[in-house]
Image: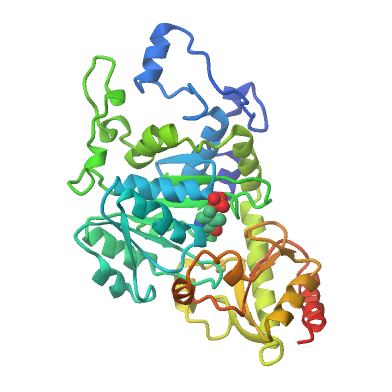
């Protein structure tokens, strides 16, 4: 079995199946010839998994899905047009129109707000644990109709870490799955399946692709959770379109034995809500994946150096620094367990001064890009309270530990000395 860096270049692709093309071809086609009527019958009855229509699958995005499955030692995946589609489809799939989602305030701003804006409207409620750092607060917050625990492994902007293994135990004791958004970590730093996660979702827009050229998402499962349960009758459903060629009714569990969760998403959410990943976008993510380890490791190294620099400015321009590598950070022990290679390239710091100085500072940086993105090859800076997390009301911002003074950095691949000098000149330009 190949190792991680070999898989990120080769897994899921056999050139002999694609005219020996060295680079994964972009199958720019909406539909595929059905050939004979017998072949068509096989395709429509799920007796063949050959491509049929690109909204459902495509050979280019198939390679991406296969590669990510192997990088996680998982069993099935579905790629989607955005990270938000991955988050919302996985939560729609697990709740199926009733029950509750248990989560934390430390979520991607859009994911947290979607619970209010989308899920409430679909008859699904949510609960937010009081203290995500205290595993017993997850246990206490589980209600009889809670259907999932949804967390992020490493969070934006403050680089906090949750105890995935302990939270997975709480979920499994309650008979519900744990879904982990692993966007910031990427599989290079952490494979959540190793610690009990049942479903892993990504915004591939971020570190997975790393070049900031594409919007994409993916949902991965390892078939560890038994969805054949009274709590999740949707997987025992036998919709007419799943029937066999002989007309026997079949469930998602029957038709997708290695991946009922992503199988049902492909059959319903991708099929009928339609956020399909374009083959060209899938190709761009594949290109990015080839350099995943090298990029993420340099971003981690750069982040740790910038943390040291910012720490040297505490008491001057800087109020505090949040990253597991920072002095006295409360996530050091969890970082040792879950992030032995380093806890990612995103960090935050408190900027001294008033709102005018903050504005001057953000407008004075030259190397850092002022953007609502993370995980790019280019370093990025932003003030979350009025941008990436502006949809959160003051209570939720408070719970997410986001202050007006919070500045978020996402480290790229530049020379770190240039990044540090740029911060220093911007501090001065802001009169701090
Ligand atoms: C960006 C992001 C998302 C949403 O992804 P898009 O690709 O922008 O739709 C979800 N979760 C996390 C942690 C993110 O950073």
The quarter of the displayed image where residue 140 is located: bottom left
Residue at image coords 34%, 76%: 134
Residue 206 lies left or right of residue 361; in this view the side is left
Kindly tell me whether residue 181 is visible in this rendering.
Answer: no
Give percent across and percent down for residue 203: 53, 51
Residue at image coords 26%, 31%: 254
- Relative vertical location of residue 15 with respect to residue 351 in this rendering, above or below: above
Q: Nearer the viewer, residue 400 or 1?
A: 400
Residue 330 lies left or right of residue 29; in this view the side is left
Q: Nearer the viewer, residue 89 or 17?
A: 89
The quarter of the displayed image where residue 156 is located: bottom right
- Relative vertical location of residue 87 with respect to residue 106 in this rendering, above or below: above
Q: Nearer the viewer, residue 56 or 173?
A: 56
Q: Quadrant of ligand 1?
A: bottom right
Residue at image coords 29%, 46%: 97
Give percent across and percent down for residue 202: 50, 51
Residue 399 lies left or right of residue 176; in this view the side is right
- Relative vertical location of residue 165 with respect to residue 281 in this rendering, above or below: below
Which image quadrant: the C terminus?
A: bottom right
Give percent across and percent down for residue 253: 27, 35
Kindly tell me whether residue 403 is visible in this rendering.
Answer: yes
Residue at image coords 64%, 21%: 19
The outermost residue toward the bottom is: 315
């Amino acid at each position: 079995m190949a190792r991680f860096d070999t898989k990120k270049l080769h897994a899921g692709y056999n050139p002999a199946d694609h005219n020996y093309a060295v680079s994964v071809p972009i199958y720019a086609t909406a539909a595929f010839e059905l050939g004979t009527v017998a072949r068509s019958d096989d395709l429509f009855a799920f007796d063949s998994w050959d491509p049929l229509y690109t909204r459902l699958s495509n050979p280019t995005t198939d390679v991406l899905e296969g590669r990510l499955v192997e990088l996680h030692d998982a069993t099935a995946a579905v790629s989607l047009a955005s990270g938000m589609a991955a988050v919302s489809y996985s939560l729609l799939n697990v709740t199926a129109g009733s029950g509750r989602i248990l989560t934390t305030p430390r979520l991607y701003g859009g994911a947290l707000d979607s619970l209010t804006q989308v899920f409430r409207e679909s008859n699904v409620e949510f609960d937010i644990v009081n203290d995500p750092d205290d595993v017993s607060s997850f246990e206490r917050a589980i209600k009889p109709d809670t259907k999932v625990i949804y967390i992020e492994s490493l969070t934006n902007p403050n680089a906090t870490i949750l105890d995935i293994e302990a939270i997975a135990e709480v979920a499994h004791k309650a008979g519900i799955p744990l879904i982990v958004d692993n966007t910031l970590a990427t599989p290079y730093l952490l494979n959540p399946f190793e610690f009990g996660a049942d479903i892993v979702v990504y915004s591939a827009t971020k570190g997975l692709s790393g070049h900031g050229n594409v919007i994409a998402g993916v949902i991965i499962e390892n078939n560890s959770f038994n969805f054949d349960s009274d709590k999740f009758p949707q997987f025992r459903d036998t919709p007419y379109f799943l029937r066999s060629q002989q007309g026997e009714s079949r469930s998602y569990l029957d038709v997708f034995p290695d991946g009922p969760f992503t199988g049902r998403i492909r059959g319903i959410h991708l099929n009928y809500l339609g956020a399909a990943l374009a083959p060209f976008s899938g190709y761009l993510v594949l290109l990015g994946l080839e350099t995943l380890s090298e990029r993420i490791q340099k971003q981690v190294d750069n982040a740790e150096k910038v943390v040291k620099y910012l720490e040297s400015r505490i008491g001057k321009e800087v109020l505090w620094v949040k990253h597991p590598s920072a002095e006295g950070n409360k996530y050091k022990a969890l970082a040792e367990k879950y992030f032995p290679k380093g806890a990612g390239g995103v960090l935050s710091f408190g900027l001294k001064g008033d709102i005018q100085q903050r504005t001057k500072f953000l407008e004075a940086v030259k190397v850092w890009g002022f953007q609502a993105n993370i995980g790019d090859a280019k370093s990025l800076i932003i003030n979350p309270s009025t941008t990436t997390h502006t949809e959160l009301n003051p209570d939720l911002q408070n719970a997410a530990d986001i202050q007006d003074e919070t500045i978020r950095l996402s480290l790229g691949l530049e020379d770190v000395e240039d990044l540090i000098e740029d911060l220093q000149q911007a501090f001065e330009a802001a009169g701090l």
